[in-house]
Structure formats: structure tokens, C-alpha cells
Amino acid sequence: MDKNTDMPIYAVDEKSGAQGGPVNQGSPEPETTAAAKPTRTLWSDAWGRLRKNKLAMIGAIWIIFIVIVALTCDLWAPQWLGSPTQIDSSQMSELSKLPPSAEHPFGTDALGRDVLCRVIYGSRISLSVGILATAISTVIGLVMGALAAYYGGIWDTIIMRLADIFLAFPYTLFVIVLIAVLGQSITNVFIAIGLLGWPSIARVFRSAILSVKENDYVDAARAMGASDARIVIRHIFPNSVASIVVYATMNIGGAILTESALSYLGMGVTPPTPSWGIMIEDGQTYLATQPWLMLFPGLAIITTVLAFTLLGDGLRDALDVKMKDA
Amino acid sequence: MADEKNAPTKADDAAASVPSDLEGHVDAQGRYPLLSVQHLSKEFPVDSGVFASKMSKRVSAVDDISFDIFPGETFGLVGESGCGKSTTGRCIMRLTNPTGGKVFFNGENVADMKKKDLKSMRHDMQFIFQDPYASLNPRMTIGEIISEPLIIHGEMTDKKERLDFVRELLDEVGLNPEHINRYPHEFSGGQRQRVGIARAFALRPKLIICDEPVSALDVSIQAQVLNLLSGLQEQYGTAYLFIAHDLSVVQHISNRVAVMYLGNLMELSDWKTLYAQPYHPYTQSLLSAVPVPDPDVQRSRKRIILAGDPPSPIDPPTGCRFHTRCPIAKEICSKERPELKEVAPGHFCACHFAAPFPIKESSINL
Amino acid sequence: MDLKNQPVPEGSHLLEVDDLKMYFHTQDGVVKAVDGVSYNLDRGETLGVVGESGSGKSVTAMTIMGLIDMPPGKIEGGDVRYRGLSLFEMTEKQMQDIRGNDIAMVFQDPMTSLNPVYTIGRQLGEGLRLHRGYSKEQATKRAIELLDMVGIPNPEQRVKDYPHQFSGGMRQRVMIAMALACDPDILIADEPTTALDVTIQAQIIELMQEMQEKNGNAIIMITHDLGVVADVADKIMVMYAGRPVEFGTADEIFYNPVHPYTWGLVRSIPEALVDEKKPLTPIKGNPPSLVNVPKGCSFSPRCPYATDRCRNERPDTYTTETGHYSRCHYSMDPEFVAKNAPTNSRRRAEENGAADAVAGKGGEA
């Protein structure tokens, strides 16, 4: 049942208008409730709704925290926890595989490096892969999706069938093959994950455009004589961008997972650069005896991916204009 | 306020040299029509996409209809859902391309206009949509929405002047000018429809196609919007093509009314005669089906209840398209399509048995 | 247990709605969707519920059926009694037995209220198999009878068809057949003809009346169209902003309305014109937000006769001996009513005298 229709929440100030035509606003009607509320833009409205979503806000705070840590860790982490990569061979045996303590909150790994420090530096790889790869996918996906939806016909058929073919391949295998062809490096991890991520974004954007195109306001713009470019920029894009924001946010989490999987399989970042995937791979040998070696990078992956998913979910609800419409 | 831009436009020049297609289409005052729809047809393919064959079936949404609209008048187009009335409006506005016939607006054929001419045509012809929720972009303020036609047509390039004009328009349609920066979701359905009306009037068009502008509104709001439309028409002399399914609404606003059924025009007359003395059995049964909010009248009057549903426009009946539901259909009705003939001065009807109140009590079991 | 075969207890009605309140708790505040609705209904009667969108007329019906999601909905007071038993005290299992079997509902949109993946026959038979334990064959046989009863040609064939093979009017007939399948006591019809064309609307209304004559069930007809209730209703409840503002017999509401909102509604309807164009008389302004219902009478901001008393003091229910009630401070003032109420065919007929009473009714068009 549509509760929304029963909850009109709009300006309550309308003048009589009983006879049409110009109506002089002799004595301004009392506008108590409506005037008290400042006009809200849709974005600030969405922010208001997002703020009330506790899970999404937890996700957002966690993401902001990780981003700050990743950006600033050079300034404080080495002094506190030592180098994430360098091995002090003289002290290695004493420092190897220490359990969590005040000095090493997450313990140390087999080579005597601080696990917390490596988790902190690992966030740099994970975040940059997540964001850059998603950026590449999004740009390609937006262009492809827009071409398919707006021009339709043969464009639509070619692009969408191409997307289907991409989606029919086993994704991780495809990424591995691509890295094998391009050569193993962190840049190529960005490129491989980014290149292969576009089909789903293209699909989401295409269907968003198609549903926006159905709206009368697009016809209204055409009936006013608006050009194609104006219709796309002023009417279609602003109304379909929300779904892309949501999807891209969730996609970042997916890209982080893929990078971890690649590193775990030895196809991603090369040691000694710390990456959560590599750390799990390193730590799994000691799962039974020194579980923290695997636990902490694993927790980092789970919480970060979960944070992006929660934020994405929250954004979806917050940006849905229909919640206020209809 | 906008008079300077209403100075002689291309349209008036065109009216001076009337193309041969408009000859004979004059009204009582000798004026040429503002809009002349001639043998308009629109077919949609049933399948679409790459694999649709050339042989696939077609929906004949509008089939060979003709009518004229004169400057400043309201022409009502009534019919049930799927009768092609909205498609007719969209063809005239070229929101969809007609598949046959001509549409003369200001003496020029809209049906084969190129993009550039279409844009200038759309300066003088505007559209009001049925759904006040879907027809306003939720991401734009109502100020932006109403200024958009002005921006597109490069009028009032000075922002302050434009916004002042928009405020004036808001006041004119009965909205608070201070709400210029609000978003559509902050308004009710009736208020949004007023925004749509302000947008349509921004360019002071000569013709506005109103596609069911009040059918999504509650009765009390519907009456407000209808009065607003009449008031604005009186002030600016705009002609309306008023498309609706509600006969009483159409009667209130229109000068002349045409009734459509399954893509065909069935009857066309001035508002008084069409309602007082329908010649077409379909018009008569439509009028009879409207419930009157008066139990005494409801109990006493005899009503014609048409059997069955309107047939599918994919495979429309041969001959008269109404014959499958018509209580007085004879053999000829399934064979020959009746022409739209003038049955009385200014009163046209497409029926082989056109007569005042053609369905008699004896012709059906009431 | 088949409730509808038990007698209605002495002193009770078939359905009694008593000061029903259903509020929704939302982010924006408490929406008082239904705020104090009361009425009684007996077998064979038709109650028309009239109001504009957001007036709470549908929510009332959904609450009776127990179809409101709680939360966000919450029953804040009142009771609904069916044959003397409170529906709110029943378990979900008991409500399931009542839904469809004792009280059935027809929805506005015949396009979305049928499941597209099952045949019409299966959907029609579902209730019978559920409530009556029919076998598959019995259910199909009954489905064919029902389709025939609601005037669908060739029912033996159509019973195997899927919803998309039916037109809008035909689907609404199927919905009515489905609602009547278990021979319910009460049929709630929520805007059953709003999505349909006038010629089809006439068919559906006639069908519902025919079925009522045959089965003797009660009907609650929810609509925004006064024309439709004029056709069918014995009693009418006019709702505004979640509250009933006037209740009476059809004759009372049409020929002797006392609430200014009812007057406004009547005046807003475009009446058939005969000689000259007349401007319509709308109600000014917009319906209030249900989160922020005006203090005093909820109609006062739009009421042309509102006084300070109306704006500050919520009106009580004023009831006449015949049960005609109104929530307006001035509805018991005959002078006020006589001066401001819109005219109607009966009044005109009286004024014109008996001689030309017939002409005053406005005739055919």
C-alpha cells in the first residue's frame, strides 16, 4: 500500500486562484509551517536522510578514517611502528611472529615487521585500486551506457551484446589473463580491474537513462524545443547520476576484494609492498599457531568492503527522489 | 509585459499568403485556422527491435482524422483510453512522427518540418502534460523549470529580468512568487500542474495542447485548474487543444468538441449541440454512461450500457470501427467506413445512420 | 469456523467501525491517516466513502482488512467489530480465514492486482481451495461458473487464459468474480472503476449491483466520484484529512448536506451545461498535510465560512435523529445551512412548484 500518497508534505500556502487569472495577494496568508522551513535542495535533502541512516554513517566514518590514515601514514606510522617493508635481519628472530602487545598492537609477522603498520600501508593499495579501478570502469561504463540508451537501435544492440560477452567470462580468471598479458604491476592491476568492470556500470546507467527518458519532463523539454545536448545534460544526467553514485560506491568494495584475491594468488602487488591480500597469503601458513597474521588484514578487508556496501545502500535510499514523490 | 516579443512573428506573415492546403478552411468570421489537421494517421509497429520483420502487425492508433482549430478557441478532443486522442496531440507537437497526413500550424506543415523549423514552431505551440509528478524535472527548481523555455529560445537573456518575469508568471497562476527556488516535490499535485501551466505560458504561445491536464487531480483542485486555464485564455487569447476523457470537463472548457473512438473521429460540433443533440450512437452512449451526482436523476433516467470492450487497434473492425458495440449497427456498418459528413451547420458526424439521438428506446433493451 | 453463517448478535450490526484511528509513524512525524472513523453496516446495504486523495478512505478499508504494515502503521484507538467480534483481537490465522471468505476486497488497479504468472482459473479457484477445501476440479468448475456470472463470454476457454489476455474491464470483472468467489458478507471496493473508461465503468457498477441483489452482501464503495456513489450508495460517508466530516443516507448527503466541505465537493463537479458557460466553483487551497493537521476544524483553512471558532476549536460530531452526522460547528444552524448550501434538483423542483418539477431535473444529458 502506498503510504506515500497519504502523506503530502508540501508548501501549504496556495492562494485562492479560484477565478484563475491574476490574483492580487492582498493580505499575505499566514505561512507558518512552510515559511519556517528553509528551501531544501534535493542534495541537502538526501544528506539529511543519509545522516539519519546509522549503518551508512558508520560506513562513511570508517571510510573517512581509512582514507585519512592512508593519506597521512607516512608522517607517523614509521616512527611509531617501524618500516612496513624493511626487514631488520639482525633482530629478525626476536621480532618474528610476536603476539599482539602494547608495542605491536597487531603483533609481528614472520619477518619481524609490524602487522599494524603493514595493514595501514596496505590500505593505500586497497583504496587506490578500489577508487582508480572504479573510476576507469565508471568512465567507460558511462559513455557506453549513454550511447546505448540515448541512440538505441544498432548502438544499443552492439554495446549491450558486447557487455553480455564480457559478463559471460569468469571475471577473476579474465583479470588474471589480462594481467598475465600486460605484465604484473600495480598499474596493470588498476587497468585490468578497471577495464573489466565497465559492463555492469554500462547496464546500470543504460537502464537508469531509459527509465528517466520515459518521464514526461523529457518530452516537455523536447516540446519546448530543447536540443539533444540540453536534454541529456539538464534533464537526463542529473536524474540518472544517483544510480551511478550508488553503484560506483559499491563497486569500490568489489574492486578491493578483487585486488586482494589477485595479491593472494600472487598476481597482484609484488612483495615486499604490503597489501592485505599478500598478508593473508603470508599468514595462512600460521593460521593455527599465529592467527593474528591473517586475522587483522582479513578484518581490514571485511570492514572496508562492508563500509562501502553500507554507504552504497544508504546512498541508494537517500538519493531516491521517489521517496518524496508520488 | 511580453508584448514586444509578441510583435509580428513569422506566423502572421505566413497567414497573409495562405497555402492552397488551407483554402476553404475558414470559420464564420473568415479567419484561417491556426491549426489544421488533415487526414492525420499514426501507426506503430507492434514489435520493435532488430528482429521485427517488415511484415509484423501495426497498431493503427490514429486513422485519417481531420479538424481545424481557430485562433483563441478551445477545441475539446474526447474519447476513452486507447482511442488515439493523446497520440493525436503528440503528432501535432511532433513528439512522435505522424505516418500520414498533414498538420498545418501557422500555415506551415508541421509533419515534414526539419529540426530548425520545429524549434521555432515550438515557440508558438506548447504542451501541458497529464501527470503533474512526471512532467517536472525533480532536480530543477520551479524557477529553473519555468525559465527553461525562455532560455532555450534565447529570450530575456538578462537573468534578473527573466526571474522577475517568472515571478510574475507564478503570481499569475496562483502560486507564491517567493517559492521560485523550491523544488517540485515540495508542492502538491494541483500546485505542480500550475507550474506546468506557467511554463507553457512563458513564451505566450498561440496554441497549447493540454493532454488530460486535470484528470490526475482531485475534483476540488480540478475546478481550480480549469478556471485558471479559462482565465489565462481570456487574457492572452491562446487557443487550446484540450484532450480529456471526461465529457463534463470538456464541455465546460471547450468551444467545439470532437469525439474519437479507436483512432477515428466520430462526431464534431460546438459544445452545446454535441451534448444537447448527439447524432452519433457512440456519443449518445458516452453521454448516457456518465454518472450524474444526483440519485433522483440516476434512478429516473434510462441509460445505455454498451456491451463489451473497445476492440484492439491492432486489428480494428472493418467498416465503421464502432459497429461491434453499436446497438443500432446494420450490415452496411461492417462493410463501409462512414464519412465524416456535415449533418447540420457546423455539426459533423461519421455514421451511416446519423440522426439526433440515434439510439431509441425501442432499439435496445434498457 | 464459518463466521458468516453465525447470526449477528442481538443489538450489533454486521460491521461496526468504532472511532477507528490509524496513524503512521514516519521520519517526518506522525501521519494521522485515519482519525476517528465510525459507522455501521448491515447486509444488503451499500456504504459510499467519498473523499479526495489522502483523505484516509483507502487506509480505513485496508485497516479493516488488516492489510496495513505495522510498523509504520499503528492502531491508536477504536475498534472494528464483525458480527460482534473485534477484528483487532483476532489472530493472524483467524484474519486469514476472514479475508476473502467473509470480507473481500476489489482494488483500483485491475492491471496489478492479478498475478501475471497464473491462469485466471487458478487465481479464481485459490480462495475456494483455501477456504472451502475444494478439489482442483471443483475449483475450476466453480471458476467457470463465476466467470459466467460476471459476464465474461466463453468462460470454459477463458478460465485457462492468463491476465494479460484480458482487457482492463474484463480484469476488473475477474477481480469481482474473485472477490465474490467465497460469497463474502462484505465486499470492499476501493475505487473499482477509477482506472476504467466511462462505458466500462457503467458495466462494472451494474454488475456489482446485480451481484449484491443476488447475494445480499454489503458493499463498501470507496470513490472520489460523487456520481458513482449517487448510483449505488444507501449511506454515504464524506472524509476529509483522515476524519469523516459528514455521514448520512444518500438522500441526506445529496439533498440536505450540512457540511461546507460536502458543499464544496458538490459545487466543484462540472455539472451538465445547457445554455451558457458558467465558471466552476472550486474549493480554494489544498488539502492539509496529515502530519500537520490544522488546529481546530481541519477544513477551516479552505472553508469560505470559517470563523475564529473554527480555526481554534475542533468541532464535535453533531448527530440528528436519523443518524445524519456532521463535524461542523454550524451544521445544526438551519439558517446557516439554508443560506449557504448549494442548490439541488429537489430544491429547485420545490421552488419551481409541483407543476414544472419534472423539467427541473435536468433531463437526459
Image (cartoon, rainbow, N blue to C red):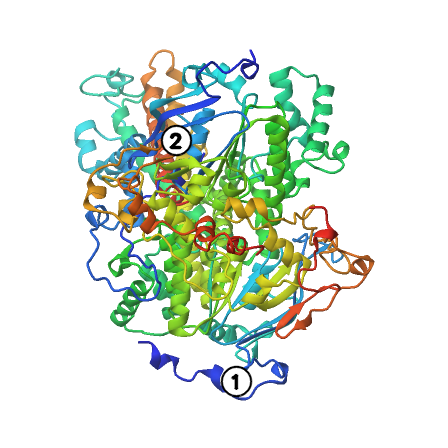
The residue that label 2 is drawn on is: C323
Query: What residue is at 55 percent from the left and 45 percent from the top?
Result: C195
* Residue B105 falls in image quadrant: bottom right
The residue that label 1 is drawn on is: B15
Tell me the quadrant of the picture where the C terminus of chain A can be found.
top left
Query: What residue is at 32 percent from the left and 48 percent from the top?
Result: A42
- Specify the label residue A285 is tagged with: none
* Amino acid type assigned to the residue bearing label 2 in the image: Gly
* Amino acid type assigned to the residue bearing label 1 in the image: Ala
Mark 2–mark 1 distance (CA, rounded to whole Å): 66 Å
* Whole-percent x, y for residue C279 in the image: 41, 62
Q: Nearer the viewer, mark 2 or mark 1?
A: 2
Tell me the quadrant of the picture where the N terminus of chain A can be found.
top left
Which subunit holds the residue at mark 2? C
User: Considering the numbered disc 1 on the image, is that residue within a helix, a strand or a loop?
Assistant: helix
User: Considering the numbered disc 2 on the image, is that residue within a helix, a strand or a loop?
Assistant: loop
Instruction: Choose between A324 and B86: the one closer to the eye.
Output: B86
Q: How many marks?
A: 2
* Residue C74 falls in image quadrant: top left
Q: Is residue B335 visible?
A: yes
* Whole-percent x, y for residue C34 in the image: 36, 32
Q: Is residue C197 visible?
A: no
